[in-house]
Every structure is written in C-alpha cells, then in structure tokens.
Amino acid sequence: MIVLRVILKVSLAVLVVLLLPLLLFLALVFRLCDELSDRRFRRLHDQNVYFVANRRHGWHEFVINNVVPALPPRVCVVWQEQMTGRVRERCLPRRLRVHLSFRKKPLMVLVTRKAYRVASMHERLLEWKLHAKKSAIVQEQIRMILDAARRELHAS
C-alpha cells in the first residue's frame, strides 16, 4: 500500500515536471498570438473610432434613437452583451475586449498604431439618457458631445 502511494506520488511529480514546460510554452504561444492579433488590428484600423455600448439600464433605446444618428462618419457601433460582458461583435481583438469589459459604457475608443485611447461617455451622456425617444434637438446636443469627445481622443 505504501509502495503504491509512493509510486503514485512519483508518477504525479514526473507528469507535472513533463507537462509544466508544455503548458508554459502553450501560454507563451497564446500570448504571442494575442499580441500579433492586437498589433495587426491596430495597424489595419489605425485612426478608426468605435462607440462601445451595452443594453443595460435604458441605454439601448437611447443609443439607437439618439446616439447612432448623431455619430460622426466612420464611427462603428459595437454592442456589448449584457450578462457575460463579452462584446457581441468580434470585430475587436480580445485584449481590447478584456480592457473594456470593466469600464462603464458607453465608451469611445480611438485605435492608433501604438495604443488604444478610451473616452468614457457614460457621465457625459447620462443626463440625456432619459430622452430615449427620437428627437432632433437631443441628437444635435449628442452630436456636439460626441464631436468634443472625438477631438479629445485625437488630441491626446
């Protein structure tokens, strides 16, 4: 019985010693793939702006009716799933999705070759969120807020 336990412990130790380098190598490969994917995305989408929103707490109707019509040209809207925190649109690389998952939405993200610049739109749009019905007046105010945020992102 004691011999069997010793054999099992030695076998387990050998297995761990053999598998640990393989696991570390795989972790390194996945990290490298993430980095390459992130760099490729930043290179291909340099200077693109994304508006990241979620459907929580009344934001959906407001964004659809008043923010989307007011968005500047070439701004892509990306919706984040409510429960899982995952971005529904897989157009963003995993590293950026993880970075954004803990921030209050909505956000504007400027992609540059070196980094991502993020501007929180939550506080700026919070007072307007109650105006979920389509309104040209609200859209004009939102357009000014979005333009200011976009200029801020490009200036920083």
Image: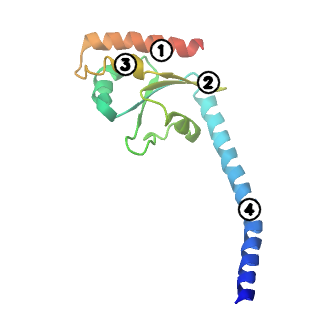
- Residue kind at label 1, given as amino acid type: Ala
* In the image, farthest residue toward the front: 2
- Residue kind at label 2, given as amino acid type: Thr
Mark found first going from the N terminus, 4 or 2: 4
Query: In which quadrant of the rendered image does the C terminus lie?
Result: top right
Disc assigned to residue 49: none
* In the image, farthest residue toward the bottom: 1
Q: Secondary structure at mark 2?
A: loop
Q: CA distance from mark 4 to mark 1?
A: 47 Å
Report which residue position mark 3 lands on. Answer: 125
* Mark 2 or 1, closer to the camera: 1
Mark found first going from the N terminus, 4 or 3: 4
Q: Secondary structure at mark 1?
A: helix
Residue at image point 36% right, 17% down: 70
Q: CA distance from mark 3 to mark 1?
A: 11 Å
Q: CA distance from mark 2 to mark 1?
A: 16 Å
Residue at image point 35% right, 20% down: 126
Report which residue position mark 4 lands on. Answer: 20
Report which residue position mark 2 lands on. Answer: 112
Q: Position of residue 39 (x, y in %)?
A: 66, 34
Residue 112 vertical position relative to residue 151 in the rendered view, above or below? below
Splitting the image into 4 quarters, where does residue 135 fall? top left
Q: Position of residue 146 (x, y in %)?
A: 42, 15
Q: Position of residue 42 (x, y in %)?
A: 61, 30
Report which residue position mark 1 lands on. Answer: 149
